[in-house]
Image (cartoon, helix red, strand yellow):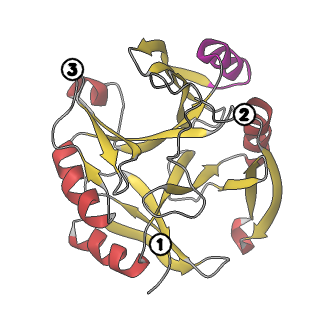
Amino acid sequence: MANPAGSFIWYELMTPDPAGSKRFYDAVVAGWTIEAQPSGDMDYRMITRSDGGNSGGVLRLTEEMQGHGARPCWLGYLGVSDVDAAVARVEEDGGRTLMPGHDIRGVGRIAMVTDPDGAPFYLMTPTAPAGRPDAESDVFSVDRPQHVRWNELQASDQDRSVAFYTRHFGWRQEGDMDMGDFGSYRFLYQGETMIGAIMPRMPQVPQAAWTFYIGVGDIDRTADGARAGGGTILHGPSEIPGGEYSLTAVDPQGAVFGLVGPRK
């Protein structure tokens, strides 16, 4: 795909209950539809938007996966030109490999790794769609509903995390916001686009992890829908710079996610 190297090109919900996740997210994120049944041999279901595009996928966590420590979560995919070379560089810089590189027919080559602080993410070299060599992923957007709009890392060592991601993925860290006793909220850019931030890991968060904020059209309606569907609001809705609102929540299966949008 034609996205710059280091772009977030896919997002994935790992859950032991895809049907329950479908009931929840279809109701919470207006415009989303999670496939009712997997479309291939693997229990993997696409998340489609109302405009016909994709927002990511849902992978069913098997008992075997959970036995090896996998838990419900959202993960991001970072696009790279060479998965195996990127894995080697991550390991050299203190990260770990959770799933070695392997090919998925018609999709590309992927691997799952952690950064030096333990936050997991995927690396991917995607296969471009037939006849569309210049196709770009649009799962991330700074301002559109039904897309992930913000990528936030809680890190135990902000300096080390900033150095890691800027060194390996071409990002830059510029500017911050004072969080008082909690420290600073340090903004991340890819090119001229602000894509997210790195913040200190909060005491109640067991390990470093990414949280992805999904764009919605009405933050209060969405928060009410999350509660009604069995989710738990952890924080917010809180006003953010620019006048919109964000919140963090846990879905009924235990995956943490964020929402961002206007108050109407």
Whether residue 123 appears in magenta in the rendering, the answer is no
Q: Where the N terminus falls, by quadrant?
A: top right
Classify 240 as above or below 79. below
Which residue is disc 1 drawn over? 235
Distance, label 1 to label 2, CA atoms, is 30 Å
Task: Compare marks 2 and 3 and give the one earlier in the sequence.
Answer: 3
Dominant secondary structure, magenta: helix
Residue 197 seen in render: no
Question: In the rendered image, which quarter is residue 152 located in?
Answer: bottom right
Circle 2 crowding by C-alpha within 10 Å: few under 14, some 14–19, many from 20: some
Q: Residue type at mark 3?
A: Asp
Name the kind of residue labelled 1 in the image: His
Q: Which residue is denoted by mark 2 in the rendering?
A: 169
Q: Earlier in the sequence, mark 3 or mark 1?
A: 3
**Callout 1: helix, strand or loop?**
strand
Residue 217 horizontal/vertical position (percent): 42, 73
In the picture of the structure, the residue carrying the numbered disc 3 is 41
* Number of the label disc, if any, that sits on residue 251: none
Q: Secondary structure at mark 3?
A: loop
